[in-house]
Image: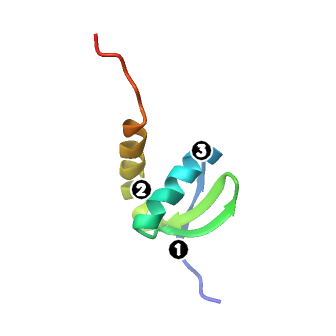
Amino acid sequence: MKAIKGSLLTCDPAVKQLILAINERVRFVIQDLDETHLLISTDKVEWMRIELDSELEKNTWSIDA
């Protein structure tokens, strides 16, 4: 077995599903560990945060006054 460098990500199940959807476009998840933990490529952490923020922004509704 070969060692793989990764970062442990803890999140709620809803955010995990968004991350897994992003992972369908660009593979960065190494292992889906359980309902709140993922092991992701360390070199993709910052990129994944930016993509996740973008997805969450799309799902945010606001009232413009």
Specify the quadrant of the image occupied by residue 37. bottom right
Between 19 and 43, the one lying in front of the other is 19
- Name the kind of residue labelled 1 in the image: Lys
Residue under numbered circle 2: 48
Q: CA distance from mark 3 to mark 1?
A: 25 Å
- Considering every residue shown, the one lying at the far bottom of the view is 1
Q: Position of residue 13 (x, y in %)?
A: 64, 47
Q: Which residue is mark 1?
A: 5
The residue under the point 43% across, 40% down is 56
Q: Residues within 10 Å of mark 3 (few under 14, many from 20)?
A: few
User: Nearer the observer, disc 3 or disc 2?
Assistant: 3
In which quadrant of the rendered image does the N terminus lie? bottom right
Quadrant location, the C terminus? top left
Would you place residue 3 above or below residue 28 in this image?
A: below
Q: Gap between marks 1 and 2, in whole Å?
A: 16 Å
Q: Position of residue 36 (x, y in %)?
A: 67, 51
Residue drawn at (36%, 49%) of the image: 50
**For numbered disc 3, what is the local secondary structure?**
helix
Q: Nearer the viewer, mark 3 or mark 1?
A: 3
Tell me which amino acid carries mark 2.
Answer: Met
Residue 18 vs residue 7, the one in the foreground? 18
Query: Which dot marks residue 14?
Result: 3
**Precedes in sequence: disc 3 or disc 1:** 1
**Badge number at residue 36:** none
Identity of the residue furthest to the top in this view:
65
Mark 1 or mark 2, earlier in chain:
1
